[in-house]
Amino acid sequence: MGSYTTLSIDNYAIHISKSNVDPWIMTIFTEQDKIIFKGKQHPENDEEIIFQYKVQIDKAIDRLTVWDLL
């Protein structure tokens, strides 16, 4: 099975990867943005632990802007 990551904005996937989480993308999020729950990504799958990060777009923009300053 493996792990998959999807970066979505307003439910529109803009980046998908398998096995590895892109470290640059994770700079958008903090530990407080993390949500952990059990569920199914697809009906045919078994229940699994899902790690999800959510942040409001204005906060994500602010966090990305910091990288422009470096």
Image (cartoon, rainbow, N blue to C red):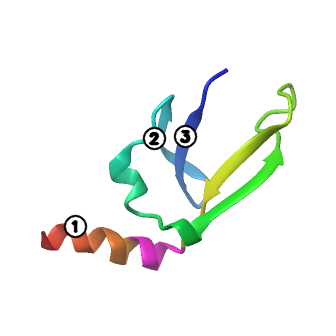
28, above or below 23, in the image: below
- For image coordinates 61% across by 24% down, the residue present is 2
> Do the residues under discs 3 and 1 have CB atoms within 8 angstroms?
no
Closer to the chain start, of discs 3 and 1, is 3
Residue that label 1 marks: 67
Residue that label 2 marks: 21
Residue 70 quadrant: bottom left
Q: Residue furthest top?
A: 1
Closer to the chain start, of discs 2 and 3, is 3
Residue 46 pos. (x, y %): 86, 29
Question: Helix or strand or loop: what does disc 3 sit on?
Answer: strand
Left or right placement of residue 62 versus residue 16 in this view: left
Dot 1, crowdedness within 10 Å: few (<14), some or many (≥20)?
few
Question: Helix or strand or loop: what does disc 1 sit on?
Answer: helix
Dot 2, crowdedness within 10 Å: few (<14), some or many (≥20)?
some
- For image coordinates 57% across by 72% down, the residue present is 32
Q: Amino acid at mark 2?
A: Val
Please, what is the dominant secondary structure of the magenta stretch? helix
Q: Amino acid at mark 1?
A: Trp
Question: Helix or strand or loop: what does disc 2 sit on?
Answer: loop
The range drawn in magenta is 56-60
Q: Amino acid at mark 3?
A: Thr
Residue 40 pos. (x, y %): 82, 39
Residue that label 3 marks: 5
- For image coordinates 54% across by 74% down, the residue present is 56
Could you give the CA–CA distance between mark 3 and mark 1, rounded to whole angstroms? Answer: 22 Å
Could you give the CA–CA distance between mark 1 and mark 2, rounded to whole angstroms? Answer: 19 Å
Left or right placement of residue 64 versus residue 25 in this view: left
Q: Residue 70: say if magenta.
A: no
- For image coordinates 47% across by 64% down, the residue present is 29
> Do the residues under discs 2 and 3 have CB atoms within 8 angstroms?
yes
